[in-house]
Image (cartoon, coloured by chain):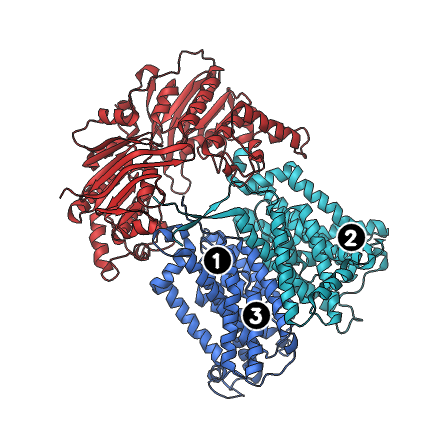
Amino acid sequence: MGNFFLSKKQNVSELSTFYSFLIGFVIALMIGTIILIIQEKNPLETFSLMFRLSLGSVNSFTSSLNKAVPLILAGLGISIINSVKFWNIGAEGQIFFGAIAVNYIYINTQVTNSTMLIFVLLISGFVGGAICILIPAITKVFFGVNEIITTLLTNYIAIGITIYLINGPWKDPGSLNFPAAEYIGEEVYLPTIFGKLSFGFIVCITFTVIAFYLKNKSIFGYELRIAGGSELTAIYAGINAKQKAFIAMLIGGGFAGLAGGIELLGQTHRLSTGISQGFGYTAIIVAAITGMRPIGIFLVGCLFGALSIGGSVIQTVGVSTYIADIIQASTLMGALISQFFFNYEIKRKENA
Amino acid sequence: MLDIQLIGLLNATLQAATLLFIAALGELITEKSGILNLGVEGMIAIGAVSGFMTAINTENIYLAIIVGILSSAAFASIHALVTVLLKQDQTVSGLILTILGLALSSLMGKEYRGKKLNVKIESLSNNNEPSNFIEVLMSQNIVFYIALILMISVSYLLQNTLFGRRLQAVGEDSKAADSMGLKVNRTQFIATCIGGAFAGLSGVYLTLSYVPYWTDNMTSGRGWIALALVIFGGWKPYRTALGALLFGFLEALVPRLQTYGFDLNPYIVKITPYIITIFILVILTIYKGGRTGAPKNIGIPFFRENR
Amino acid sequence: MNENILELRNISKSFGETKALNNVDFYLRKGTIHGLLGENGAGKTSLMNIISGLYQPDRGTINIHSRKINKLTPEIAYSLGIGMVHQEFRLIDSFTIEDNLKLSKANIFNKNFDDAYKKYSDIFSLNTDKKRIIADLSVGEKQKIEIMKLIFNNSDIMLLDEPTAVLTPQETEQLKIALQKLAIEDEKTIVIITHKLKEIKEFTEALFVMKNGEMVSKFIDSKSTSTKELVEMMMGEATTYTVKKDNIRSEIKLKVENVSLKDPMTNIKILEDINFEIQGGEILGIAGVSGNGQVELANLISGINKIYEGKVLIKNEDVTGEGVKSRKKLNFAYIPENRLGVGLAPGVSVIDNSVVREYFKTKTALHLSKSKTNKYLNNLVDKFSIKSGNPKAEISTLSGGNMQKLLMGRELTINPEVILASQPTRGLDVNSVDKIHQLLVEQRNNGTAILLISEDLDELFKLSNRLLVIFEGKIIQSFETGEMDISKVGLAMAGING
């Protein structure tokens, strides 16, 4: 070891993230193949079945896209917060909180116009997510409390509150085996626009554009980048770094909350623990794998959505649904490992 | 003579606490070396399933424990490879470990779901109806005692031995440690694997004793609690054990609340430890001027300035 | 005993195009205290990094204990008993003194630690318990622990980088006595690396002097060489001033009135009653050994720190208590001492860093125009001949000189009326230094008032119209153009008002 050392490469191609994603994906498919062979399944058949069932028809294609919505929105939120180099491990909880907020407003609202109401409810979802990250945001920005831990803990608090609500105050007496809140009225179901494609996907595209603009083109995003690089430079430039970082955290939480709202209004139609199946965690993978780039998050989100759909339908032929999770996780692990080789050189010390 | 329900509560508390504590202690060791591993949940799952599978197939409980420990340590070495040697982000790598571990364990354990275990971990006494505190302690199985021994020895090692101080030196200030001739990469790699081994022990305790059967995602968030416990305990083994008792007590209490006639909502009770942990972390950060006990270099990859 | 315990011959080392060391000889005699003298950037640090195995020389031979070392790595250097105390301490703050001394694998006093600790803490006049936490110690105490660490690790060759920079006069005296004892009683070979003349003569027996990467004097007797001779060796012949100082001056543009500052925690005075004013077309230099209040002074003039006593006026407008933006509006430019970390944000792209000053001037408060920022950067690159490469690459991919040119260009392209430049050429190669001096002089000729804070006397003498010397937070002496004299200024920097 003493004869080698790491040196950061000077010029790293901008496409390196993309290449490492591809390498990671190929590695993941190989791992998937090995697992399938061990399980005595034909990998080629299984993968082509997964492909057909997730992308092969309009129906499956649209459900893949619907599945991608929460991943993308939560991933975008994580990427906005990461502009200041903070982590948000709490997207899962924010998704739940968004859904809770939607249900709360739905129960208590006076608004009757259904379009108007859907609009109000989507906003409540956003606000719910922002509320969920409020404590971690205040404690991180103003007191320096580690946000990885606090956001992580809020997941359990948010899910705990959800369980409390669906077993207590909001319990649907009709739902016996599976605790859940009462169904929302059909008047607030998110409309479908193309086949099964939910209006949520349009919201998702819109927010991808917003996030892209915010991060890459706006003054706000610029100020976040500078603050993330060095708080002292931000002060030197006259940027109120703390305030901007705080706002960024709330917005990021809001994106995940919106995802929860869309899941409730467009997919599950009632509050339950099924609002998210680990979307908040997978979203971190999606965001990290793309180097926190909004367009990349959108694309990888769609791919991972399709993988999830593919994964959940192949269990009908006796293949474990977890193969999709494994492929997702291995893609990122493979991408991380190859990132290293794009960014560093292992140099040998020259002789004197 | 103690109330039979109280005995039950006590017993359940100790068991739940043991499970949480072992994993937390492993994470504590890893973090002391400066590596954050968010993959505890995944590592417990791997240990749990591989231990269970071994126990079913060989009916050898000790072999099962060893296999569980080694599998998780091997699994943790992925994190060590990616973060220690390849210097990639610890947060991301740890999360992948969790997702991968949960998925992989479900895949591995598919054929073992609902199978019945014919062997069990030995206890000191075979008293099935303990009637006082001592007897409850005596009726715990060996993993409980291993946990006690680990608690005392890890605390001693960290505080009083050169070995332990060197481990912490690496986590506090890897550059200074390097200048003292300590092997930073090696220390962190080993500490990460030890963390995995502990999580593995916690996992086998789950499937071979605590539950004991196998089903998907049966770790149900215990790995995350273990992470919270390390913070709760201010990176100190005894305080972490205390935290484990509190979390374990609440886990044991929740299903019993109604029998006691308490008008506390069990779901609210269940989230209180998380709120307390956030509160403690905030208080420690603010009032101790950042001296939360957290290793200073945690999460920061080590590079030597060479050219 | 006249053998050389360490011997370096014809050592050369280049970094890219910069020659850090050129054919350098360096040798040490056992049980002797050596001095290595030279200005910042003379090559002292590079030489020390070669001796401690961190850098590999391009050419030259290394002999240690009369044995030829083909390849010196940090591990080998360590095992041969070479130890270094860096300016930034390598102690573990949250650990006790005992831990810090014991943890190293090379520690030779594990068994009789208490005796050894007592012996050496007596030598260093360190009256503190071994169980104390490093973070609670004073800087002087930490310094002592750092040196003791070398002894405990069995280092026979001890390299001390600017050991007196952070010490009080009493501590400096204690250190001198301790080092002399170590050299005599333990036969330690000691090197003191410094650019300060004051102590070096008292501390050392033999001296090496470096200038511009070359060893200009080898193993000369410290006591018989006069300070004046040393200054000449270190700085070369009295610089021929190519900068004319008879340019036209205008009205007062920066005024600092009765400024004082206390450390809020300890209540110790950091700055005391600072007063000066600068006219347009004038460069006012502030000389001083670092750590005498320069950073704090720059922070409050630039508006980064808003809480202090006294007043700051820019172009006759009172900006006391106001922030950075108020100064920007008054055409004030600040080139901070920490180029990367304050002036430029690490990890952020070149293009983003280039618009730190101007970004908010875009018409819409929301949108950051890519074409405008690109144009702005291209303009800077042309005007200040910056080698910038890919604008989207991280700022740290630029060389130090190019970084500083980008930072200066960014601040100067608006034609500021007042400039505060703090250590603008520290660590830069000769060409970049020249370029930056030119830029400052150009600005001065255009009628800008410039406050130049520097440790580099050459630079200060070359550029300043007037010179103030700061010592322990006070201006202790001022010099007009004709009065600047290297030994008087040097003495003032050491706190002696001549």
Residue B174 place in picture, x, y as percent:
41, 52
- Spatial separation of the CA atoms under disc 3 and disc 1: 20 Å
Are tags 3 and 2 found on a single chain? no
Question: A198 above or below A12?
Answer: below
> From the viewer's perspective, is A99 left or right of C45?
right
Chain at numbered mark 3: B
Question: Which residue shows up at 62% across the image and 30% down it?
Answer: C373
Identify the secondary structure beneath mark 2.
helix
**Which residue is disc 2 drawn over?**
A200
B227 or C51: nearer the viewer? C51
Which of label 3 and label 1 is nearer to you? 3
Q: Residue B46 carries which label?
A: 3
Question: B231 above or below C232?
Answer: below
**Which residue is disc 1 drawn over?**
B35
The residue type indicated by label 3 comes to Ile
Are tags 3 and 1 found on a single chain? yes
Question: Which residue shows up at 40% across the image and 50% down it?
Answer: B175
As drawn, the chain in red is C
Report the number of discs: 3
Chain at numbered mark 2: A
